[in-house]
Amino acid sequence: YAMKGPVSESDVPFTDDSNKHSYNDFKDKDVDYLADNYFYKYYENTTGKCSTNQISEIKELIVEYGSVGVAMNFNQSSLYFTNGMYYRYSGSDKLRNHAVILVGWDDTISKSNFNGATRDGAWIVKNSWGTTFGDNGYLYISYDDKFICEEFEFYTGITENKYDNVMKSSVSI
């Protein structure tokens, strides 16, 4: 019975092609760390941008736990992506096709960096595509991105996995 938690990238390496990983690629891999207290939050986005309350809550979580995972709609079209590191999605496609982590924010990044943004400020985002992407592997996503604050997740800690074998109990409660 496999433990749940992050797997090493060497076990399921990132490939820059159209092959997508499925749950089966991960389910039997050993994990070095176990995720403690997983939390998921969903806000229906009716305004098409992050609310003041969402921004405040996510900032508090980043300070407390170090990062917040988000699902985003990523499209490298110049309509949404500028200067290789600034991003704001405003399209109509509701697909969330990429997972990243928010590791910080900068309220002084000018809205002029984001096509059509109405306010300054952006999330600092760690991407998984290596250091040649964006700003040494990071990008900035506008607070006015349509979906970046709509759903997010975080863990309150991690525990080192010290178990070689985990037995699944046959006792039902």
Image: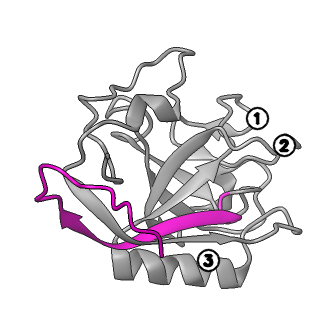
Position of residue 12 measured from the top left corner of the image (x, y, whole percent): 33, 28
Q: What residue type is disc 1 on? A: Leu
Judge by depth and name the residue closer to the eye, 12 or 69.
12
Comparing marks 1 and 2, which lies closer to the viewer?
2
Sequence-wise, the earlier of marks 3 and 2 is 3
Q: Which residue is mark 3?
A: 55
Sequence-wise, the earlier of marks 3 and 1 is 3
Question: Crowdedness of circle 1 by 10 Å Cα count: few (<14), some, many (20+)?
Answer: some
Give the vertical position of 63 relative to 155 (above or below): below
Sequence-wise, the earlier of marks 1 and 2 is 1
Task: Based on the picture, tell me whether residue 101 belongs to the magenta stretch.
Answer: no
Range of the magenta residues? 148-173
Q: CA distance from mark 1 to mark 2?
A: 9 Å
Give the vertical position of 22 relative to 170 (above or below): above
Judge by depth and name the residue closer to the eye, 33 or 86.
33
Q: Where on the picture, by quarter, is residue 70?
A: bottom right
Question: Crowdedness of circle 2 by 10 Å Cα count: few (<14), some, many (20+)?
Answer: some
Q: Which residue is mark 1?
A: 79
Question: Crowdedness of circle 3 by 10 Å Cα count: few (<14), some, many (20+)?
Answer: some
Q: What residue type is disc 3 on? A: Ile
Position of residue 114 measured from the top left corner of the image (x, y, whole percent): 68, 50
163 relative to 71 in the view: left or right: left
Q: What kind of secondary structure does the magenta stretch mostly adopt?
A: loop
Task: Based on the picture, tell me whether residue 160 belongs to the magenta stretch.
Answer: yes
Q: Please tell me whether mark 3 sits on a helix, a strand or a loop.
A: helix
32 relative to 65 in the view: left or right: left
